[in-house]
Image (cartoon, rainbow, N blue to C red):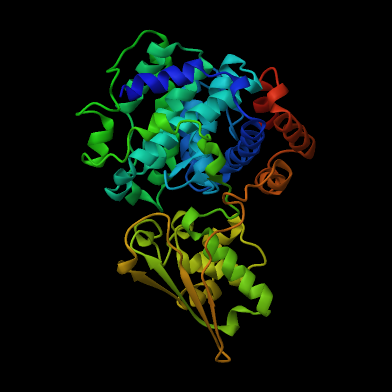
Amino acid sequence: MKTTREIAARVSGTQFEDFSDQDVSYSKTLAMSALGAMVAGPHCVGSDKITRYVKRAGGAEEASVLGAGMKAPVEMAALANGTFAHATEYEDDSFPEAVSSYTLFPAILAMGEKLGSSGQDVISAFILSYEAQARIGLACREARRLGFMVLSLAGSIGCAVAGAKLLKLDEESTANAIAIASSQASGIGYQTGTMSHIIEMGFSARNGLTAALLAADGFTGQQDILEAPRGLFNIITAGKVENPDAILGDWGKPYRINEIGIKSYPCCYHLQRMIETTAAVREEEGLSADDIKSISVEVNAFFPTVVQHAEPNDEIQAQFSLPHSLAIAMLEPQVLPSGFSREKINDPKFAAFRKKVETIVREDWGWTPTGWTPNLTYRLADGRIIKRSPETARGQPPALLGFAECIPKYRGCVEGVLPESQIVTSIEIMAKMDKCADIGELMRTVAV
C-alpha cells in the first residue's frame, strides 16, 4: 500500500465539515489542556535555558514565545512552546500508540498564529495530525520496546502533517513534508527524568514545521518513506511492523483523538492511577503518612524502563519516581507541581516515606505499556493490610473529560501567570474555537 501518499491524500482532502461534533468538542478540551501547560512551562526546570537559546537565535517575529514577552521564527517558537508544554509533564496521551496531543498543539498554535489561521483550520490540523501520528504509533509499537520515544518520533511526522494542513498544501507537497520529517524523527525513551526528555517534544514541533515549510517551497523526499523496505517503519521496528494495513483501514473509524486521556497529575502517565488510588485510600481510611508501614507495588517489566528514579535528585527525576509520587499523595492535600520541587525532594518527611515504597517487577507479566494492572499493597502500622488494583484513572478513555471539567486543570496552570481577565478571555475563545476567525487572538491573550 502507498501509505505515505495515502496519508497525505487524506490529510489534504479532509475538511472541517467531515468531523463529528464529538471530535470538535473534545479537540477544544485538549487544546485548553495543552495551552495551559504551554503557559506554565516557562517556569519549570530547564525552560529558562530554552528561552535564552531562542532569544540568542533572533530572527523574524512570527509567533509568540510564551513567558518570554517576545516573538520568534515560527519553528523556534514551536521549539520553545513544545518544550514548555512537556516540562510540566501534564501531557495528554493515548495508548497503546504512546503519542500525545501536547506534541502537536505548540506547533499548530505557532503556525496558526503566523498564518492567521481560523479555529476551524486549527481543529482540522489537530485531528488529522493526531490521526497520522497515532496510526503510525500503533503500527510501530515495537519501536518503543527497542527504546524509541514514539511520542516524539511519530510526533515529528504529526507536526509536519499539521503544518502542511495549515499551509493548505496539496497531496504531493504533504507527502514531501512527511518524508522530510521522517529524516528528523527520533526520541529516546531512556532520557526520561532529564531535560533531554523534555526538549524532545520541542524538537518534534520545530522539525515538523521545518519539514512543512520546506515542502511548501518545493523541497522533496521519498514519497514512500514510511512503508518502503528501507523506510522509517522497518528501521525503527527492526522489521516488526504491526498490521500496517490498519493505518489506512482504520483511519478515522473513529479518530484516535477520542482515545486521548487527560492527566490529573504533573508526572508520568504510568503513575496516574497509582497516585489516584493512594490518595483515595488516604481519604477513605483517614490515614496519615505515619499510619503507613510500607507500600509494595507490583508492576510489569515495562514500567521501570520509564519510571526509573526511586531516589530523585531533581524535579524532573521526581516526575518519574514512584516512591516520591506516592509520598506526595500521602503527605500533601493535593498532588500539584509544588510536590515535585527540590524542597519536597529534600524534605526529611518525604525522604523517609520514599523508603517505605517498594517496587516489585513481575517479569512474568511481560513487557507492554498497557494491558496490565498494578497491585498495590498498603501495610498499616496497626497491622491491617489494604490491597488495590486500579485499572484506570480519572479522565482516561472511555470516560473522557468535558470542557468544563478540564477548566480547573487549565486554571491550575495559568493562575499566577496570567491576569484573571486574560484567563477568562482565553477560556471563552477556546470554548468557541470553531467560531474563531484568527487563532492569533488566543495566542496574544496568553502571551506574557
Residue 201 horizontal side relative to residue 426, left or right: left
Residue 332 horizontal side relative to residue 8, left or right: right
Residue 447 makes an appearance in the image:
no
Q: Is residue 296 above or below residue 162?
A: below
Residue 319 position within the rendered picture, expressed as x and y whole percent measured from the top left = 48, 57
Look at 61% across and 38% down and name the residue there: 30
Q: Compare residues 94 and 426 and report the one nearer the observer.
A: 94
Q: Residue furthest right?
A: 421
Residue 34 position within the rendered picture, expressed as x and y whole percent measured from the top left = 59, 39
Residue 424 position within the rendered picture, expressed as x and y whole percent measured from the top left = 78, 36
Residue 121 makes an appearance in the image:
yes
In which image quadrant can residue 435 be found? top right
Give the number of marks.
0
Residue 281 horizontal side relative to residue 208, left or right: right
Q: Residue furthest top?
A: 218
Look at 43% across and 17% down and name the residue there: 9
Look at 55% across and 64% down and name the residue there: 275
Residue 445 position within the rendered picture, expressed as x and y whole percent measured from the top left = 70, 29
Q: Residue furthest bottom?
A: 382
Quadrant into which the N terminus falls = top left
In which image quadrant can residue 186 be found? top left
Look at 41% across and 67% down and name the residue there: 311
Quadrant into which the C terminus falls = top right
Q: Compare residues 412 and 395 and report the one nearer the observer.
A: 395
Q: Is residue 16 above or below residue 355?
A: above
